[in-house]
Structures are given as structure tokens and as C-alpha cells.
Amino acid sequence: MSYKTTDKMNTVITRDYTLLQVMSRFGLSLGFGDKTVSEVCEQSGVDAQTFLDVVNFLADGHLPDTADLYSGRRIPALMAYLKNAHSYFLDFKLPTIRRKLIESIDCSANNEIAFLILKFFDAYIEEVRNHMNYENEFVFPYVEALQDNRAHQNFSMQVFASHHENIDEKLKELKKIIITYYPTRADNNAFYSVLFDIFTAEKDLEQHNAIENKLFIPAVLQFEKEVAKNLQQAGETQMQSTEEELSKREREIVICVAKGMTNKEIADQLCISIHTVLTHRKNVARKLQIHSAAGITIYAIVNKLVELKDIKDISLIS
């Protein structure tokens, strides 16, 4: 079933205790009484719909419309969730499993299997750390730049998505190695406990990957398109507003330059001094951020101040 913002939070959690992790990663505290999902989220400044996007996806695989997912506060809320998940895995869950492994297996020098198991796990932790640190240092700042309508030429979410690897696979392998090859007593409760932790960590990491692949990445890809569209429209608006900033005399100067006239010819045509022509040209260059005659000519054509047939020296725009 899919949960709604009007459902009681205690109903949602008691039906599936694993959703406690979702609450924690969204920064939601316990002790919420009989409040609804909406009320609990509002109390902690969390977007309730984003919380439910994750809950319903984990509960029954329900995916929201991408157009809804990237809107409003939902990408920032989802990104905060992922950052907290990274902290959970790197700073708590995986170090805890490592400590329990050391306590439950024979780490003496002559137990090569135990030594290799620990070495395998340490290599895995490093792999996960590199994976999550890359997202913390590059992916999330990129998304934050998108939210500020700032383009980033050296990064693409599409490229990241195509190389986004699942980080739960090696835990599956470690689990199999331990079960198949590490002998232990049936009463070694600590060992069975850590093995259970590895199983749950594997599932948790699998769900974490699924949230990134099915919710976060599609939302950002859609958001990229919107930002690109907005930047294009802003550029067109800027060009229009820039033209409006030119005075009538400055537009006359632009037309004369585009027609290939010299400063003296412009002065004679407009009955002004050469010094005044030079002053106007400086102002035009400053307002348009265009300093060459070729650039001014192209500007004049694009903005329909002159026609191509009026250009004497066609090499100016070639």
C-alpha cells in the first residue's frame, strides 16, 4: 500500500520497522505521539512528500512522476537524505561491522581465512568510502550549483549515471565466503550476529543504490533540462534587454559600424565630432560586451538593425 501525508506516522513505522532508518536519515525524531506524517515532517522542516517518495518506493516500489520529484524542495530534501545515509554507512554501520568481525573471528596470525576475510572487508570499506566521497565532493555540489542556476561545464549527471556502480555486490561475495569457508562453533553468537549485520547492511546498501538510481538521478536529469532551458531563456532576455539599454544615438552608431563606415564617415553622417563617435563606441562596447566591428555587425544583423545586403564588407561576418 502507498502511504499518504495524512496517515499517522506511528502506523507507517510500526508496519515496517526498517523505515526507522528513513526517519533517521531525514532527521526526524521519535516521540511524535499521534501526529500525522505531514505534521511530523513539518515539525522538523522536512518536505513530507519527499519523505513519502522514499517510504513508498521502499515499501512497494512506487515511483513518483519525475516532473513532481524535481520540483520545489524535493531534490534538496532527497539530497540531505542521501548525505545522512553516507554518514551512517561510513561513520557507523561499516565500522561497527568491522569491530564485531574482529571480536567474533580468530584473528591470530595462523588463521589465514580470518585474516583474508578482514582484509577483504577493509578493501570493501575503502571502495564504499571512495564511492560516497565522490558523490559528496562532486555530485552534490554540482546539484547545488544547478539549484542556483549555475552551469557546470566539467560534469554531467548523464555521465555519472552511466558509471554509477552498485556498492552492495562485494558484501554479497563476502557473505558467501564467510558462510561457505569460515568454520565456527554453533554457539558463537557474536559471529552469527555480525553475519546477520552483513545481511542487513547488504539490503540497506541495495536500497540506497535503488533510491539514487530510481529517484535521485532521474530527478536531477530532469532538473538539468529545466535549468538549461531557463539559462537559454535568460540569455535571450539578456540580449533583448541589452538592446533596449542602447540609446537612439548608440543604435545609430551600431548601424553605421555594421555598414562598414569609418569613424570620420560616421561623424559626418550624424553631424557629430569624431571624439563623440569614439565615446559612443566605447559605451556600445561596454553595454554589449562586444568590442570588434565583426561582433557589432553580427549583433546588428541578429537584432534586425541592418540587413545583410547593407553590409559592404562581408568578410566582417565570415
Image: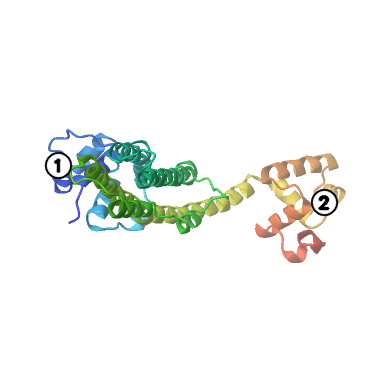
User: Residue 318: where, in percent of width, then height?
Assistant: 77, 62
Q: Which of pointers 1 and 2 lies earlier in the amino acid sequence?
A: 1
Crowd band around label 1 with a 10 angstrom C-alpha radius: few (<14), some (14–19), many (20+): some
Where is residue 291 shown, x and y percent of the image?
75, 47
Q: Does residue 261 appear anywhere in the picture? A: yes
Q: Quadrant of the N terminus?
A: bottom left
Frontmost residue, 190 versus 295: 190
Q: Are marks 1 and 2 in contact (CB under 8 Å)?
A: no
Among the 4 quarters of the image, the one containing residue 57: bottom left
How many neighbours does mark 2 have within 10 angstroms: few (below 14), some (14-19), or many (20 or more)? few
**Residue 78: x and y, percent?**
35, 46
Per the rendering, the mark at residue 10 is 1
Query: Which of the two marks, 1 or 2, is nearer to us in this view?
Result: 1
Instruction: Look at 30% across and 56% down and name the residue there.
Output: 64
Q: Is residue 298 above or below residue 27?
A: below
Check the image and report above or below for 118 versus 218. Answer: above
User: Which residue in the protein does label 2 denote?
Assistant: 269
- Secondary structure beneath disc 1? helix
Residue positioned 48% across, 54% down in the render: 160
Q: Nearer the viewer, residue 298 or 84?
A: 84
Q: Secondary structure at mark 2?
A: helix
Q: Amino acid at mark 1?
A: Asn
Judge from the rendering whether residue 245 lies leftward or rightward of residue 291; answer left or right.
left
Q: CA distance from mark 1 to mark 2?
A: 82 Å
Label 2 amino acid? Gln
Identify the residue shown where x is 50% and y is 56%: 159
x 70%, y 41%: residue: 286
Q: Residue furthest bottom?
A: 309
Residue 147 left/right relative to 247: left
Instruction: Tell me residue 176's x, y (percent).
Output: 31, 55
